[in-house]
Structure formats: C-alpha cells, structure tokens
Amino acid sequence: EKGGYPHFMLKEIFEQPRSIMDSMRGRLVAENTQLTMSSIREYATRFKNAERILIVACGTSWHAGLVAEYMIEEFARIPVEVEYASEFRYRNPVIREGDIVIAISQSGETADTLAALELAKAKGAMIFGVCNVVGSSIARATDAGAYTHAGPEIGVASTKAFTAQVTVLSLMAMMIAEMRGTMELTALRTLMLEMEKIPAKVEQALLLDKEIQAISEIFKDASNFIYLGRGFNFPVALEGALKLKEISYIHAEGYPAAEMKHGPIALIDENMPVVVIATKDSSYEKIVSNIQEVRARKGRVIAIVTEGDTVIPQMAEFVIEVPNTHEALMPLISVIPLQLLSYHIAVMRGCNVDQPRNLAKSVTVE
Ligand code: F6R
C-alpha cells in the first residue's frame, strides 16, 4: 500500500509530478493558450465582475490560499483577502453579494472552513470550492468548484494536496485573467507553457533527496528553525515551518524575510538554522541582503536557490539548487526540498511521521 516507501508521507511527496499533472489534465493546453475549467466558465460573469475574492481555509490549505492571493492579484487584478476560517466565521465579517468566496480544503470536512462558507453563503456570496475529496461536505456545500486530483492523501502532513491546490489555483488565476483581459496574451502563454513543465521540474527537484538527507543529519538536533521567503515564496516559508513543527516537533517560525528585522532577528545566533527561499525572482536582491543580515549574526543559512546561482553559494553554509520557472509558479518547486527536509529530520528523530502526536487528518471539530 505504501508502494515500497517506508511512509505514506514520502510516497506522497514522490507522487507530486503525477498529482500535479492529474490536476492540470484536461484543463490546460498551453500550445493553444487554452484553459478549460467549466465551473469558472459557468460563472464567467461573476468572476469578470468580482469586486473582491475572499479565500477561507485552515493550515496548509490556508498557505495555498496565500499563494493564490499573490497570483490572482498579479494576473487578474481582483483584490483578494485570505482568511483563517476559524477567525472569519466568528468576527462578523463584511461580506457583499458581489463577493466570491473560495474555500480550499483537502479533506472537504474541516469544520471551521465549512462553517465559514455557510456563513458567506447566507450573506449572498458565491461559493467556489477547491477540494480533494470528491463528494465531501465542503464540495457539496459550494455553488461550483474545481477538484484537485491529488488522489488519497494518507499522511497527516499535507504535501501533494498542497501542490495540487496551488496548481488548480494557478489555472484559475490564469483563466480569470484571460476572461478579464488583465494579462497580455503572450505573457499568459509563457506562463501556461511554464505550467506544463512543472511536473518534470518537480521530478528534478525530487532528485535532491539524498543531498537533503545529508543536511538533515546535520540539523536534526536543532531545537528551533526560522524559515524566510519573500513574494511568492513567503507562503512557502510558512509551509516549510509548519511541516517541520508538525512532524518533527521542532519549534519553527516562518516569516516574510523583511519582517525579520522587526523582531525575530533577535533570535539569531550561531545555533539558529535559517532556511531561506532565495530563488531568482523580482525580490532576489532584497533576499540576498536578508541573507547577509542573518550571516552577520552568525545564523546558519540553508538557502534554496535557482540552479546556477553564483552569489548565494558564497554566503550560505548550505545551498540547495532547484530548477528555474516563472516566479509565480516557484512555490510548486521550492516547497519540495522543504517537505523532504522535514520528513528526514522527523525520521531521524524517531517521530511517527504519518501520524504525528495530537493531530488528526481532518479536523471535523472546531
Ligand atoms: C498540515 C495539515 C493541516 C491541514 C488543515 C486543513 O500539514 O495537514 O494544517 O492543512 O487541517 O485541512 P483541509 O485541507 O482538509 O481542510
């Protein structure tokens, strides 16, 4: 059942080229600049005229929502708010009839997410679901939706569901952009062609496994970790930190890199591992300075960089090179080494990676 892997989590990490492909299948033909998502087409007028999109989710699905916020705002120019479902539902939120609410959930059974969408529905918003489990409560409660075809996710730590969510949300962002005419057709086509190459690039990133295992050996006894990223990689920093804490029980904080100097920088000393997602994108120069700030305080930098980077390898103690892609799609690749890092560290610490203490696969109580 684990397909020869020692744990479901590792199997699911390695399934990602396939699950991403399955989540795109029938929806994207880059050559013809063609996107097919019938549920979005059906609500074309709503999406075209949407004044605002609210995303509600929990945990890892909330992180996928953050990536979607950056993509939808960049490509489709619709303001997006990403909400923790548990906060949203209890704070008397402002919901208008022209709003679209996107609920993201792997299990489709998360109690807070379900309650949040019911509330928004009662106030007249259109509800769109991005779920993995077919026929789940959330999928049934929505007006329309698009499934992530990740297949069953057994490991409690979400891995392939996250990349499948980001895949579907990217396609949605592209399709809404196309309908609204907010993106040049050539730029859209380039993005779509890059999207098609993602499964092969994820496959390539998975080859880093041995290298990451060696780094894990060095840091397995750490009691804290900091994860930093900017722009599209900021949600990846949060996700990397969440993966590490939930399965290895090491305290980890994810932060937007520039926010570090407003507090967390005080934590940095020669014992602090700092994972920096520093791929070549529009915030590259800025993140290079952030790495310098960490080095100046003797933090131990593990940097995720773009293949061929010559600058960061001179500054960081460890570098992990990933294939390049469009910056908006980088989360699909940069998250892979972080999943592997948390997995190996947890195994080395003797933790039960598939069923971490105190956690349930789907949180059906609030
Ligand atoms: C983290 C994790 C949780 C879930 C969260 C939402 O690895 O698995 O944070 O992402 O409980 O679950 P779903 O997506 O089923 O609503």
Image (cartoon, rainbow, N blue to C red):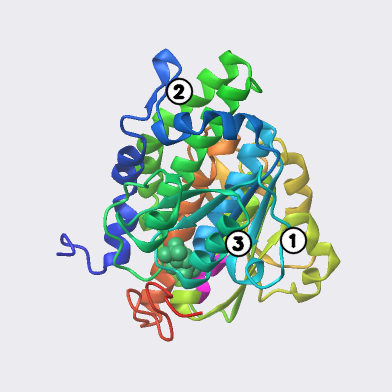
Q: Which mark is residue 23?
A: none
User: N-terminal of the two: label 2 or label 3?
Assistant: 2
Q: What is the three-letter code of the residue carrying label 1?
A: Arg
Pick whichever of labels 1 and 2 is earlier in the sequence: 2
Residue position marked by numbered label 2 in the rendering? 193
Q: Which label sits in the foreground, 1 or 2?
A: 2
Q: Which residues are magenta?
A: 241-245
Label 2, label 3: how many angstroms apart (C-alpha)?
Answer: 28 Å
Other-residue count near label 1 (Cα within 10 Å), few / some / many at <14 / 14–19 / ≥20:
some
Which residue is at 61% across, 54% downward? 235
Q: Secondary structure at mark 1?
A: helix
Q: Work out whether 358 lies above or below 61.
A: below
Name the image quarter holding residue 182. Answer: top right
- Kind of residue sitting beneath label 2: Leu
Residue 244 is inside the magenta segment: yes
Residue receiving disc 1: 295
Specify which label sits upstream in the sequence, 3 or 1: 3
Question: Which residue is at a point 54% across and 68% down the rendered structure image?
Answer: 242
> Could you tell me which residue is drawn at 29 percent across and 51 percent down?
15
Label 3, ligand 1: CB separation under 8 Å: no
Q: Look at 43% across and 75% down and name the residue there.
A: 363
Front-lying residue, 249 or 168 = 168
- Furthest-right residue in view? 262
User: Which amino acid type is shown beneath numbered disc 3?
Assistant: Leu
The reply to whether the magenta stretch includes residue 47 is no
x then y, percent, for residue 110: 45, 69
Foreground residue among 284 and 136: 136
